[in-house]
Image (cartoon, coloured by chain):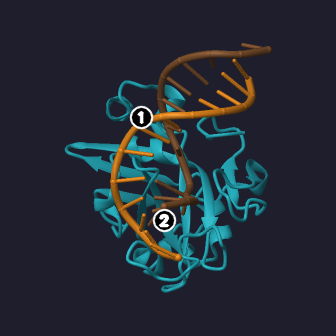
Chain colours: A cyan, B orange, C brown
Amino acid sequence: MTDTTFSILEQPADYVAQRLLGCYLERSIGDETIVVKIAETESYDQADAASHSFKGRTPRTDVMFGPAGNLYIYFTYGMHYCCNIVVGKDGEGAAVLLRAAEPLGDTSILSLNRKGRDGIELTNGPAKLCQALQIDKTLSGHDLSSPPLRLRMQPALDACAITTTTRIGLTKEKDRLRRFYITDNAYVSKK
DNA sequence: AGCGGGATTTTCT
DNA sequence: GAAAATCCCGCTT
């Protein structure tokens, strides 16, 4: 029997980042529910100088030190939001950044939120994904087991379907292999 | 297809 | 005061 419960999220970030590939996010907006499949992730934990939690708990990173299964949303570059899932044991300060996802079903709301863009441009980057799904700081700390944003675990992918690389956009810890994506997925932000 | 710069504001030093 | 887990546009090859 395959384990698809949230207790999986309490494992180390490197493992959870890979385990989340292929899992679903359900976003409710008004009457509509949009489902996307997670296609690209990065892992961060407190021992990592590139992580927001590296210097300890601050007002901004407080939710990162909370229980696994909550959202950690941060604002960056003066205009973008990025979305993480808090992982690891309570108080650990680990999270997985959601960098890309594949929309399943109707994409009209996503396209509207993305100012008319379509196809892979809807969700092939962390800030694009947040814009498409209308995710901002008001959802930081939200528990992903309830609406309006739920995580639906799915069976683990085969290891051979996953590509591992260095992370994107960092100035510290650039060499660490902590980015993971579904190898043949079109929505991956960069090959 | 690839490179370079500008946008814009929160967060922490 | 500087940097930032990014994106988009315009220019060059």
As drawn, the label of residue A85 is 2
Mark 1 Cα shell of 10 Å, populated few (<14), some (14-19), many (≥20): few
**Quadrant (top left, top right, bottom left, bottom right) of the N terminus of chain A:** bottom right
Q: In x, y percent, where is residue C3?
A: 58, 59
Given this view, does label 1 or label 2 mark the residue nearer the observer? 2
Mark 2 Cα shell of 10 Å, populated few (<14), some (14-19), many (≥20): many
Q: Measured along the vertical axis of the image, is residue A125 above or below residue A155?
A: above
Q: Are marks 1 and 2 in contact (CB under 8 Å)?
A: no
Q: Measured along the vertical axis of the image, is residue A54 above or below residue A102?
A: below
Residue at 43 percent across and 79 percent down: it is A58
Residue carrying label 1:
A105
Residue at 38 percent across and 43 percent down: it is A131
Residue at 56 percent across and 80 percent down: it is A55
Residue at 39 percent across and 31 percent down: it is A107
Residue in the foreground of this view, choosing between A161 and A17:
A17
Mark 1 residue type? Gly
Residue A69 visible? The answer is no
Question: Badge 2 sits on which subunit?
Answer: A
In the drawing, does residue A21 fall left or right of residue B8? right
Mark 2 residue type? Ile
**Quadrant (top left, top right, bottom left, bottom right) of the C terminus of chain A:** top right
Q: CA distance from mark 1 to mark 2?
A: 23 Å
